[in-house]
Image: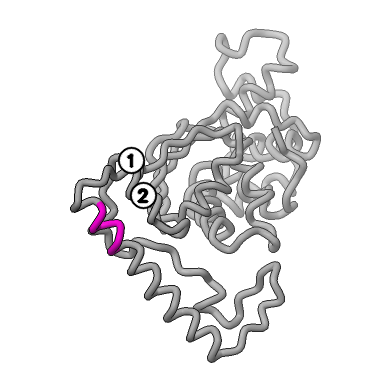
Amino acid sequence: MDVQTIRSTPDPEQLVCTAARGDYFDGFVADVSYETLMDGVSVKDRHRDGANQCLDRTPNELDCKQYALLEKTLRRGHHGVWEHPQITLGIKGVSRACMAQLTRHRHASFDVQSQRYVDFSEKDDAFAMPESLTNPEHATRGDGNVDVSNRESWLDHFEHESDHLFEQYAEMVDDGIPKEDARFMLPIGTKVNMTVSMSGRTLLHIANLRMRGDAQWEIRELTEQIVDDEFADWMPMTAHIWDEHGPTDIAP
């Protein structure tokens, strides 16, 4: 799988802090500079250290105030301000099973590669391989005690049957069966691409649930990639605070 940011709100943490300060500011946030708006935020050494750990540059006073306010706001459960920044992600090559789990999160918007219109006959690497068939160390809700010979046998069987289903699908399409009907032949492990848009709060909520040890392996790997590669670059201070303090009750 692969995840890339298509578009995102610029300076998202500044927007979060602007919204948060606007709740307590006696003026109008659109009439003053960000520096003026942040004048009332106090900074302690731990906030300076935190800002230093998650920025590529040496933090200035405004950076430290921003980190301090973000940390304070998260700690107090003022999560609504993270709904203002938005990010749109392109997700490549996840199974329909993983897609079904991800789209259960109601406060995100999804578009999924359509099996009604896209021909899946010639796709390379067309289906996701179950982790338990390839990784002896894989832990899941099952007991995980799969004999080596059984695992190898089922791996061969899975690959053979999946290839066969795609061959049958291709023959149906070639014989004029509409793709929207031929797709019923495709397994739930068929890979699709997605476009997903969400707020910073929804992203944190998904991370809280889907990076847990009891999450299914594929959506856990997807969420880890989103957080480590995209979210940490987009909201470095928030990602650092979240990583330090662990999941919080941030559900919409």
Q: Quick check: 20 above or below 115?
A: above
Q: Residue at x 56, y 90 (%)?
A: 148
Q: Nearer the viewer, residue 215 or 150?
A: 150
Main SS of the magenta part reads: helix
Q: Quadrant of the N terminus?
A: bottom left
The image position of residue 223, as x and y in percent, is 55, 53
Amino acid type for the residue under numbered disc 2: Arg
Quarter residue 68 falls in: top right
Residue located at (71% from left, 76% from top):
143
Q: Are marks 2 and 1 in contact (CB under 8 Å)?
A: yes
Is residue 68 depicted above or below 84 in this figure? below
Q: Nearer the viewer, residue 114 or 137?
A: 114
Residue extending furthest toward the bottom: 149
Find out whether residue 169 is within the magenta segment: yes
Instruction: Give the residue at x 28% y 40%.
Output: 117
Q: Is residue 202 left or right of residue 43?
A: left
Report crowding for label 2: few under 14, some 14 to 19, many 20 or more residues within 10 A (C-alpha).
Answer: many
Residue at image coords 63%, 50%: 240
Q: Position of residue 48 (x, y in %)?
A: 67, 46
Rounded to the nearest whole Å, what is the CA distance between mark 2 and mark 1?
Answer: 7 Å
Q: Which residue is mark 1?
A: 116
Reading the image, the residue beneath label 2 is 183
Residue 94 appears left or right of 206:
left
Q: Position of residue 134 (x, y in %)?
A: 50, 78
Q: Which residues are magenta?
A: 167-172
Horizontal side of 155 relative to 92 (left or right) equals right
Q: Amino acid at mark 1?
A: Arg
Secondary structure state at the residue bearing disc 1: loop
Q: Earlier in the sequence, mark 2 or mark 1?
A: 1
